[in-house]
Amino acid sequence: MKKVLIVFLITAFLLLTACKGDEPSSVPADITASPAPEETPVSGTALSTETAAPAYGKNAAASVSDTAALFFEGDEGLTLYGAVAYENTGDCPIVIDSAVFTFTAEGIPIEHSFSPAFSEYTVLLPGETSFLTAWLVQDEETPFTAETEVSMAATLTARRAETDMRTLLLLDNLYLADNYPAFTTLSGRIRTEGASCGMNVIHTGFYDEGGSFLGSWYFTKNTLLESGEAKDFVAQMHGFPIKGLSEKAHEIKAIGFGFTL
């Protein structure tokens, strides 16, 4: 009888202990002890949201770091070419609303104002670099020739982007080849890690062995890219004025933006 009583008491104690183990803890979790999120904004977060707005300021600024200009004989006759490399030196994402290229040839100023193509999709974050390129076909009465030396200064009007939402394209395996007599080809691989896009614009800058800026070039591709997908591309650089670019360029910088119209 004593043995039965002992077994009964042990069983009751174990059942009571198990039931208590299923009850919630009386001490709440200290959620304030969780690490604070990093202040670095995540691409795709609207600036107007409470979490993203404090990460950026309101100073929209762009600084021109390099320029290149020259005359060349293009498909439509004598053409004036200008290119700039610029950096977002402000404290917020920017787009370039307008650009003014002021050329000087034989003491004669030539001013060209324009709005960059697809600028609304080219959202540049602080510290990032991109490029602008322009071509001006000269009339038949021009006093200049392809050998005329020309210099250039540029003024950019930057505007604070309303959002840092963008589809940034990643480019690698870039390769230049002068395998055609009339133009250079640029090949490489392009991919997006953000939203899918049906079109894209790519800006490229070329630098020689000493780091001097040779010029820039941009192109668009009507190519569907799904998120995370990579595709190879080959682009014919019609209108780029420097012959033998594959031998002269030792560094290629590129930035691309995807969008869907």
Image (spheres, rainbow, N blue to C red):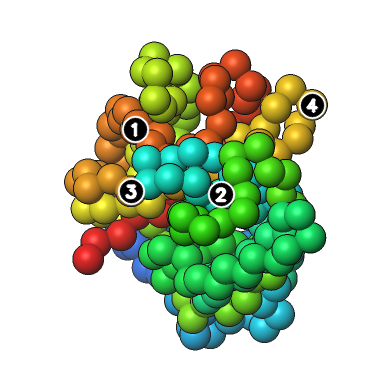
Residue denoted by label 2 = 81
Residue 74 spot, x, y in % from top left? 44, 40
Q: How many marks?
A: 4
Gap in Å between the C-alphas at discs 4 and 3?
Answer: 29 Å
Residue denoted by label 3 = 220
Residue denoted by label 4 = 210
| Disc 2 residue type (three-letter) | Tyr
From the image, state whether disc 2 or disc 3 is nearer to you. 2
Residue denoted by label 1 = 235
Mark 3 and mark 4 in contact (Cβ < 8 Å)? no
| Disc 4 residue type (three-letter) | Gly
Who's the residue at 60% across and 16% down the image? Answer: 247
Q: Earlier in the sequence, mark 2 or mark 3?
A: 2
Q: The residue tagged with tag 1: helix, strand or loop?
A: strand
Gap in Å between the C-alphas at discs 1 and 4?
Answer: 26 Å
Q: Please indicate, yes or no, whether residue 143 appears anywhere in the rendered image.
A: yes
In the picture, the quarter occupied by the N terminus is top left
Q: The residue tagged with tag 4: helix, strand or loop?
A: loop
| Disc 3 residue type (three-letter) | Thr
Residue 219 spot, x, y in % from top left? 38, 46
Q: Please indicate, yes or no, whether residue 131 appears anywhere in the rendered image.
A: no
Residue 228 located left or right of residue 78: left
